[in-house]
Image (tube, coloured by chain):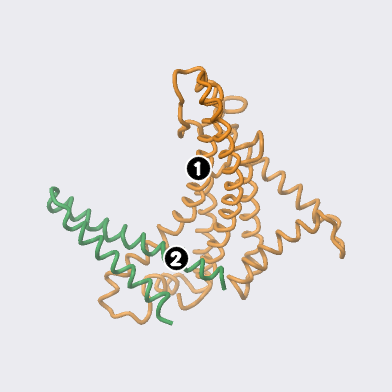
Chain colours: A green, B orange
Amino acid sequence: MASNEEGALWSILGYLISGLLIWGGIGYGLDRWLNPHHHWFMLVGFLLGMGASIYLVWLRFGRE
Amino acid sequence: MFVSAVAGPGFVPPSTNDFNLPPVFGNSAYSTKPVLLVFLSIILISIFFIAASRKAAIVPGKLQFVGESIYAFVRKDLAEEIIGHGFLQFVPFLFTLFTFVLVNNVFGIIPFLQFPAMSHVSFPYVLAGFSYFIFHAIGIKKQGIGKYLKGIAFLPGVPKFAYILLTPIEIATYFLIRPVTLSLRLFANMFAGHLLLLVFIGGGNYMLHDSHLFMKILSPFSFGFGIAMTFFEFMVQCLQAYIITLLSALFIAGALVDEH
């Protein structure tokens, strides 16, 4: 059981990183494309990605 | 590097240059120290386990006992506990991965060898590539490609609109983040560990050869830290070998489970 918990830990870390990277990256791309002088989309993307990945972690590991 | 640090005007801190070792013989990139160490590790592992299993007895000798303990650890504590049903076919891969990474990591603190090959990122990349290929192949074979990809991209029991947010994250996690976390963690730990030892032991060496008496007196502290860090490194090296095997087993287990 201990190793399964350790596994969950690493999976959660993976989800949090990829949530930030993907949505932050999409926001960054939108910024570059639409208004290169601001970073609003990236900020929104980071927050969105953070929220979505925490939601995903809850779905995967918190529901039972 | 140490010679230049002593002869030069000041301390030259260790850098990534210390990882780009010149070829041991000839002029080929295939005769550098990490490559030779990897070959040495394969030879040593083979000799050890052939010797340990050649005269298999009911009452094991010392060598057989050590060999069987390592095998039992990978088989029972990693493969069987995590993968569960049908774990046996993955034991050879996990066992090879564990012993290979363990021996190569521990090479980092063995006198005269003293270089962890895994501090060159291409070695962990290849190992992670094997895991990556195996767990995706298993998933596709077990569930069929459509069902497997659907299981990754669409988590059941989630409102439809949430898929817009969640699906990119799931896909990125499975196809981009997993191999990266698998390989970079091993690489970064070995790289940082080797650098740490270089700092303390190289620094101690520099202080010992410095002209000020004060520096000479203080140099044992640096060496002492180097020795303490060597023990710490041994722990990290074993742990990282365990973790890369554990994660590979977990990914395989995840690919085998249907509801994913």
Question: Which chain hosts label 2?
Answer: A
Residue B19 position, x and y percent, is: 51, 34
Residue B96 horizontal side relative to residue B187, left or right: right
The quarter of the picture where residue A18 lies is bottom left
Q: Position of residue B99 (x, y in %)?
A: 65, 53
Q: Which mark is residue B191?
A: 1
At 37% from the left and 76% from the top, the residue drawn is: A59
Q: CA distance from mark 1 to mark 2?
A: 23 Å
Task: Identify which residue is drawn at 25% across, 60% down.
Answer: A46
Q: Is residue B169 left or right of residue B79?
A: left
Question: Is there a contact, CB below 8 Å, between mark 1 and mark 2?
Answer: no
In the depicted view, which residue is nearer to us: B126 or B245? B245
Query: Circle 1: is it few (<14), some (14-19), or many (20+) Cα within 10 Å?
Result: many
Instruction: Please indicate whether residue B235 sits to the left or right of residue B152 in the image.
Output: right
| Same-chain status of marks 1 and 2 | no
Q: Residue at x 50, y 49 (%)?
A: B125
Give above or below for A36 relative to B147: above
What amino acid is at disc 1?
A: Phe
Q: Is residue B114 above or below residue B61?
A: above
Q: Which residue is mark 2?
A: A11
* Residue type for callout 2: Ser
Image coordinates for residue A5, horizontal then vertical, percent: 51, 70
Q: Secondary structure at mark 2?
A: helix
Disc on res. B31: none
As displayed, is residue B239 above or below residue B120? below
B239 to B228, vertically: above or below: below
Residue B44 lies in what quarter of the image? top right
Q: Secondary structure at mark 1?
A: helix
Please name whichever residue, B4 or B31, is drawn nearer the observer in this view of the structure.
B4
